[in-house]
């Protein structure tokens, strides 16, 4: 979920600039992308790609304050804290308070974009601005206020909580939301990734709780600041200094509590939830692997062959093309600081669910046992390597990649060596990596749909 402010005054110019940067990056997609990195005296880590072709700057600032830091009894604390961060600023240092409308107007007047997001791991802030000194200085100063001085107005919190409760109630009528919650609980158990946001957990969240959570997590020393744009290292250092200047200093930098690893599944498990709908929803999977795992390239390439490649994947060929059991079927890993889940997902007619589950399990088990063919390997490499420049063809995409490198402590030459590392993966590498990471006989299967008593063939 991402919140982005609106902008008006210089919208045509900034959109023209974004398009120009896109063309420039497309022209140089095959060239090296030098990433500079340094640590500020206060502990913040800064990553910079200088892109002087056009006068624009993208900044991403991330903190370890995502939903994995939620207390179990207050699931949703990080997400709800995030929703309050553009609802107004406190009056401080001689500057006036701003309500949500005044804050939105201030960003619009600058022609800049500012967004806030919360994921399982990160609480993040994004800034996009033209680098005209007058505009950029004001945008950075306003960003610094928004990062450090949210007002958390009580009346707005009541409104947002009521809105979230209404959204939750509506989600209970959608099978896609029901299966996502059930799958997370089945795969992650009591790990924070498995916590469920409910009306009860939201009712336990107060303004004081959000302030305490924010103060503990959003500290300058733990910031990962990524920048892509027409600034020098000296300018980038100054920008980072200003954006973090209002946050607590090194004295507040106490270690965050360790989060236990995601536990492996001890045995297979099936969860069946009755729901009257035209399609039965199915998830099959288990905990996957952390992003730092050395098998990442082999798993990424192998998953493309198994179910990540759309119509050219094995799962699509076997489940859809040969048997007509579903319109779409996919597989995917979600690696992060912790072992995000591996998942096979599809929808099918209720009367075909048992067969579709059986076939999907068989395809997965065979792939883990045997790995890909040489023809599959070559086709997957051609597609992934050929499409790699499209992941870098705009400032917005590039800042996402740089922030990913920063967050996961990846090598600074990661983007430059990506093609060679992907090309070096063999079929044997994929087979070995999948055998290490996946256990088809110990996976979770969650089925949401009609006729929940119909047991898939081959299940225990």
Image: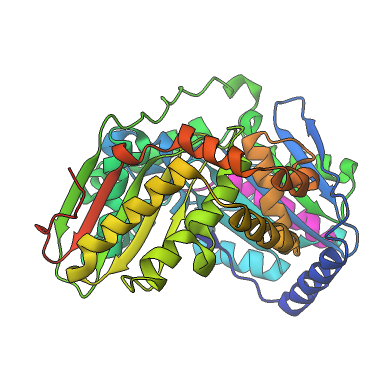
Q: Would you say residue 15 sits in the magenta stretch?
A: no
Instruction: Give coordinates of residue 181: x percent, y percent.
Output: 28, 51
State whether residue 12 appears in this view: yes
Q: Report whether 455 appears left or right of 419.
A: left
Instruction: Give coordinates of residue 378: x percent, y percent.
Output: 67, 56
The residue shown at (31%, 67%) is 347
Along the line of sight, the residue nearer the viewer: 161 or 88: 161
Q: Report whether 286 appears left or right of 45.
A: left
Please say if 77 is above or below 97.
Answer: above
Instruction: Give coordinates of residue 360: x percent, y percent.
Output: 34, 56
The residue shown at (51%, 33%) is 217
Instruction: Tell me the quadrant of the picture where the C terminus can be found.
Output: top left
Along the line of sight, the residue nearer the viewer: 139 or 368: 368
Which image quarter: residue 444?
top left
State whether residue 170 appears in this view: no
Which image quarter: residue 180?
bottom left
Magenta span of residues: 134-151
Q: How is the image coloured?
A: rainbow
């Amino acid at each position: 979920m991402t919140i982005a402010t609106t902008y008006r005054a210089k919208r045509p110019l900034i959109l023209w600039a974004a398009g120009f940067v896109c063309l420039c990056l497309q022209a140089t997609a095959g060239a090296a992308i030098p990433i500079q990195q340094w640590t500020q005296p206060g502990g913040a880590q800064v990553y910079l790609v200088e892109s002087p072709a056009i006068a624009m700057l993208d900044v991403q600032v991330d903190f370890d304050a995502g939903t994995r830091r939620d207390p179990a009894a207050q699931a949703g604390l990080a997400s709800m804290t995030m929703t309050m961060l553009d609802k107004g600023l406190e009056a401080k240092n001689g500057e006036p308070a701003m309500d949500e409308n005044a804050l939105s107007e201030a960003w619009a007047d600058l022609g800049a974009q500012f967004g806030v997001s919360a994921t399982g791991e990160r609480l993040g802030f994004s800034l996009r601005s033209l680098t005209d000194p007058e505009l950029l200085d004001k945008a950075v100063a306003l960003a610094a206020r928004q990062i450090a001085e949210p007002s958390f107005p009580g009346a707005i919190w009541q409104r947002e909580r009521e809105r979230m409760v209404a959204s939750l109630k509506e989600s209970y009528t959608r099978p896609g939301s029901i299966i996502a919650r059930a799958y997370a609980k089945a795969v992650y158990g009591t790990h924070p990734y498995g916590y469920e946001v409910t009306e009860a957990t939201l009712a336990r969240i107060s303004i004081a709780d959000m302030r305490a959570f924010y103060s503990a997590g959003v500290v300058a020393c733990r910031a990962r600041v990524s920048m892509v744009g027409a600034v020098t290292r000296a300018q980038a250092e100054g920008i980072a200094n200003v954006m973090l200047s209002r946050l607590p200093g090194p004295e507040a930098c106490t270690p965050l509590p360790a989060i236990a690893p995601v536990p492996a599944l001890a045995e297979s498990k099936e969860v069946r939830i009755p729901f009257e709908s035209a399609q039965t929803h199915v998830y099959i999977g288990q905990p996957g692997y952390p992003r730092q795992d050395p098998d990442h390239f082999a798993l990424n390439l192998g998953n493309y062959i198994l179910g990540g490649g759309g119509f050219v994947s094995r799962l699509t060929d076997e489940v859809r093309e040969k048997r007509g059991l579903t319109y779409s079927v996919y597989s995917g890993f979600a690696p992060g600081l912790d072992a995000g889940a591996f998942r096979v997902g599809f929808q099918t007619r209720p009367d075909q669910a048992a067969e579709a589950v059986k076939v999907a399990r068989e395809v997965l088990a065979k792939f883990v046992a045997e790995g890909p063919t040489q023809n599959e390997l070559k086709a997957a490499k051609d597609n992934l390597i050929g499409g790699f420049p499209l992941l870098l063809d705009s400032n917005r995409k590039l800042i996402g990649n740089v922030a990913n490198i920063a967050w996961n402590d990846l090598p600074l030459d990661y983007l430059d060596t990506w093609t060679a590392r992907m090309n070096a993966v063999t079929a044997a590498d994929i087979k070995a990596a999948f055998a290490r990471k996946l256990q088809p006989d110990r996976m979770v299967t969650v089925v949401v749909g009609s006729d929940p008593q119909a047991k898939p063939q081959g299940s225990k």
